[in-house]
Image (cartoon, rainbow, N blue to C red):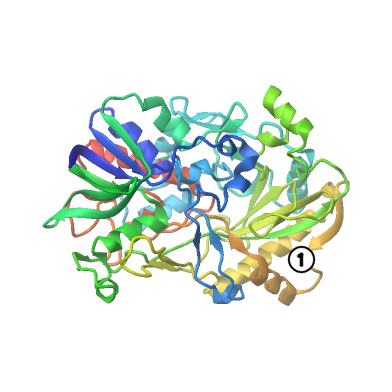
Amino acid sequence: MSGYDYVVVGGGSAGCVLANRLSRQHDVLLLEAGDPDEAREISVPIAWVELLGSEYDWGFRTAPQPELNDRSLQFTQGKVVGGSSSINAQIYVRGHPADFDRWASAGNEGWAYGSVRAYYERLEDGEPPACGTGGPQHVVGQADPSPISSAFVDAAVERGIPRRGHAEALAAEGAGHTHVTQKSGERHSAADAFLKPVLDRPRLTVETGAEVREVLFDGSRATGVRYVQDGETARAEATGEVILSAGAINTPKLLLLSGVGPADHLRAHGIEVRVDLPGVGRNLQDHLIAWICYESRTDDTYDDADSWLNVLRYLVLRRGPLTTNGGEASAYWRSESGLDAPDVQFLFAPAHIERNGLGDTGGPAFSIGTSLVSPKSRGRVTLQSADFDDDPVVDPRYLSHEEDLETLVDGVRKATEIAEADALSAYRGDRIFPPEGGESALAEHVRANAVTYYHPVGTCRMGADETAVVDDRLRVRGVEGLRVVDASVVPTIPSGNTNAPTLMIAERAAELIAGGD
């Protein structure tokens, strides 16, 4: 058994930040189940769509969702160095200040936006101007956006959504181009930003292809992990802490398999109960997104992004459609007045998007996605069996709260109003979907076509009540030497894309750990 100060499980966004920060003064082992991020598709921004369902994806699927016509959805999570930051659409959004103030008002000290803003600034480099200048995560505006994306912003303004002028990448009400984690026309993942620059540190060890199967304990203290690599079982000892950064699906799965979770659920699978924590795997939250699509009257779309001319432009100049993430512009909207933050995000793509990927219209098209960013529905992650090789049961229970469907339908209606504004008239052809119709037709479109936005959080929620899994220092309740640092600790889902908040959580956690808190 090898010994380290800290064993970090998961080399995704949070794990890369932790490995960087903690290895400055401590011996750190980072265990990643996936392979190195060497595939060319990972570095080319628009090629992320080819990574969904690939060897770099855990390949989870949801349980059939009753409110989505019993569909089982593809549920992508990155299985590669850099985690989901190596396969996502690179959108960088801090969230809305009200999101974090809500965390703090629930008794989580130090998590209000006034406190966490400094951690964002410490992480970020590049544009917009309000980003910090010392951080390695490169955050920039779109390098070479399509003119249709600019027309979408104008259309949203025409339909009453203010133009977004914030320098910070916030989910504040307004329309504008998206900020992305890119550098010199390529993806800039958490691995690029935080891990690769410090791989030569003598106090940092990184192992890939290492699937952690169990957290090891001595009494009530976590002492290390058992993992499998190249078919061989190994153990790693942590004299300081074991830190789980495996994500909102695999972190609760690993806790449950290690005997930490709801006692009745563990006993039902023949697992010895170490700590009865009812909240493990509960409180699953995710963003749903439903797309509308129109034919385009111009060729300023990305339906032929991989043409030889565009490939040449990318290889020689790092310009053109291959530098885009696809979702070039967005808008945040309050479906009701009086809300403390927008509850709907619109995402614009100059391409035909249908459910989880590219569709085929036989010609150019553009799409607007409507995402429910403040869902009230809550789901759970549970074990299928006590066998690690069996995927957990992922049941988001989408639209189980009736208000979520109402809000999403309102959002889709607003999206069609934006699409049919004068600002897009030079580009807009016939509507492809949804079909014309009233409220019931839009509701059926949502039920038949809404998909995950790949933003699961909350399954190891921080808090002080009996259903919280970790405290506001992210320490697992009821045990010592075990911490969770990833999107699973989020109490309520942020109002935007979740990679940036995950990086922030890890940055703050590293400071807490280094300070002995």
Query: In screen coordinates, is 326 left or right of 2?
Result: right
Q: Is residue 125 above or below residue 72?
A: above
Which quarter of the rendered picture does the C terminus lie within? Answer: top left
Q: Secondary structure at mark 1?
A: loop
Q: Which of the 4 image quarters holds residue 445? A: bottom right
Furthest-left residue in this view:
219
Mark yes or no: residue 495 visible: yes
**Identity of the residue drawn at 26% across and 35% down:** 28
- Residue 113, quarter of picture: top left
Give the x, y percent position of residue 414: 72, 60
Residue nearest the observer in this picture, 435 or 166: 435
Which residue sits at x=46%, y=31%? 193
The residue identified by callout 1 is: 434
Residue 283 location, x and y as percent?
40, 65
**What is the tally of numbered marks visible in this picture?**
1
The residue type indicated by label 1 comes to Pro
x and y percent of residue 273 in the render?
Answer: 20, 68
| Camera sees residue 507 | no
Which quarter shows the N terminus?
A: top left
Q: Residue furthest front?
A: 231
Identify the residue at image location x=25%, y=66%. Answer: 277
471 relative to 130 in the view: left or right: left
Crowd around label 1: few <14 · some 14–19 · many ≥20 (10 Å): many
Residue 141: give x, y in percent of width and height: 62, 34
Q: Is residue 471 left or right of residue 43?
A: left
